[in-house]
Image (cartoon, rainbow, N blue to C red):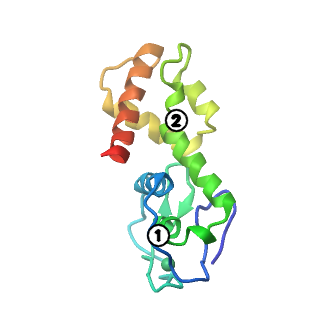
Amino acid sequence: MIILDDRHLLMIEPRNGKQPYILDDLTQKAELVYMRAKTPQYGYRGFHQCVCGVTSDNLDHILPDGTITNSLMVHYIAEHRAEVPQSEIDKLERLYMAFTDPHIIGEEQVTFDSWCHSRQIKGNWKESLFQHLKATRTGADLENTQEWSEAWKELLNKATSRLTR
Ligand SMILES: [Zn+2]
């Protein structure tokens, strides 16, 4: 099934055989975003076989903001790049930026709320980020802008170090 709306990411069906694996920034971003996905306890989607023969699992892979993707998303980006619609690449870039945008670091007035607002992070995603931050920084005053920026910088460093290892 092909679904290109805003609630889904890389739910596509390439028509041509796979091409040589592209290991570049975009593939690494796809890996990072995919690592954020959680799966339900049991599967109910059908297994999906890509045109090249690779088979997906039968689970929804749910990103922290509720966006649904699938276990072939990195495969599509890495090995079917030419057939990925630009709109899906834009969507992937947005999700990646929402987790790792370094530009907010060092800004004086950034707060958790204003940062989330600027990146359009809301609902469950915002809540899970906040809980993660809280768990990481026991005792930190998250209302304090300075404390918050430091804590956020740590999280970003952890996330980006996985990209540059
Ligand atoms: Zn394939």
Q: Is residue 39 above or below residue 15?
A: above
Q: Residue at x 49, y 41 (%)?
A: 99
Residue 142 image offset from top left, x and y in percent: 43, 21
Residue located beneath label 1 in the image: 75
Q: Tell me if I can see residue 74 in this picture.
A: yes
Query: Which mark identifies residue 34?
Result: none
Q: Residues within 10 Å of mark 2 (few under 14, many from 20)?
A: few
Quarter-wise, where is residue 51 in the image? bottom right
Structural distance between the alpha carbons of marks 2 and 1 = 24 Å
Q: Residues within 10 Å of mark 1 (few under 14, many from 20)?
A: some
Query: Which mark identifies residue 101?
Result: 2
Q: Amino acid at mark 2?
A: Asp
Quarter of the N terminus within the rendering: bottom right
Q: Residue at x 49, y 39 (%)?
A: 127
* Image side of residue 26 versus residue 31, left or right: right
Q: Is residue 154 above or below residue 21?
A: above
Q: Amino acid at mark 1?
A: His
Q: Secondary structure at mark 1?
A: helix
Residue 47 image offset from top left, x and y in percent: 47, 82
Residue 71 image offset from top left, x and y in percent: 45, 69
* Mark closest to the chain's N terminus, 2 or 1: 1
Count of numbered marks = 2
Residue pushed farthest front? 20
Q: Is mark 1 within 8 Å of ligand 1?
A: yes
Q: Tell me if I can see residue 144 in this picture.
A: no
Q: Secondary structure at mark 2?
A: loop
Q: Is residue 60 above or below residue 122?
A: below
* Image side of residue 132 versus residue 67, left or right: left
